[in-house]
Image: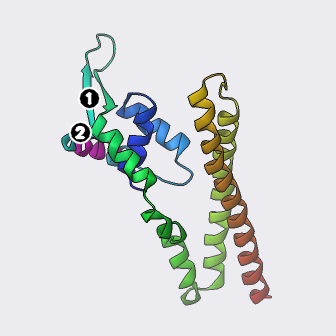
Amino acid sequence: MSLRHGLLGLLNYAPMTGYDLNKEFNESLGFFWQAKASQIYRELDAMERAGWLSSERIIQDDKPNKRVYSITAQGKAEFLQWLSSLDPINNALRTKSAFLMRIFFGGELNPESTLELLSVFRQTYLENATHLNTAMEEVNALPHEDERMSKNSKYWKLTALCGEIMYKANLEWVDRAIAILQEEEE
């Protein structure tokens, strides 16, 4: 998935400001795709130049002015084409992880250093798991009277379920990795 397509997907639901997109992206997609605000704004500019979205500048008296982005017909066509493409399926199994690369080469360090790294990883994962639980609770709390919202929430639940299982698997892995390294020290 590209950041652009994630942003198009969110704009497909409703027009939003860059601030709102950043917040919504991190709250709904953040457990499997991370983006910084600067990346989001850079992509919004590029997508507007490509004709995938348009923006309207809103002048406000009591607050800073804001820019509201909307998906265009061309942007919706690009989003739907990407969504139905089978190309990214092969990439779903590949992971780029500087963290795992550090673990792979961890034999060059003393075991205590790698144990500390694994402990920090574990603690960070536990903290982030609460974000995933919150996302699942929010999806479950959505009103189901709106047919489109009800249909989409089912798919949001599927991604949150994947995240939940991946979090559990990573916590199991880190616990086992710590146990293996601690056995070596004994």
Give the left or right position of residue 126, taking residue 5 as reference. Answer: right
Quadrant of the rendering where the C terminus is positioned: bottom right
User: What's the magenta region?
Assistant: 40-47
Residue 36 visible from this viewpoint: no
Asked whether the beta carbons under mark 1 and mark 2 sit within 8 Å of each other, the answer is yes
Disc ID at residue 55: 1
- Callout 1: SS: strand
Name the kind of residue labelled 2 in the image.
Glu
Q: Which residue sits at x=68%, y=66%?
A: 170
**Residue 8 drawn above or below residue 58:** below
Disc ID at residue 48: 2
> Does the stretch in magenta take in 50?
no
* Main SS class of the magenta portion in the image: helix
* Residue 21 quadrant: top left
Q: Nearer the viewer, residue 66 or 62?
A: 66
Give the left or right position of residue 170, taking residue 82 as reference. Answer: right
Q: Position of residue 19 (x, y in %)?
A: 39, 33
Quadrant of the rendering where the N terminus is positioned: bottom left
Q: Which residue sits at x=52%, y=66%?
A: 92
- Total of numbered circles in the picture? 2
Q: Which residue sits at x=33%, y=11%?
A: 62
Name the kind of residue labelled 1 in the image.
Ser
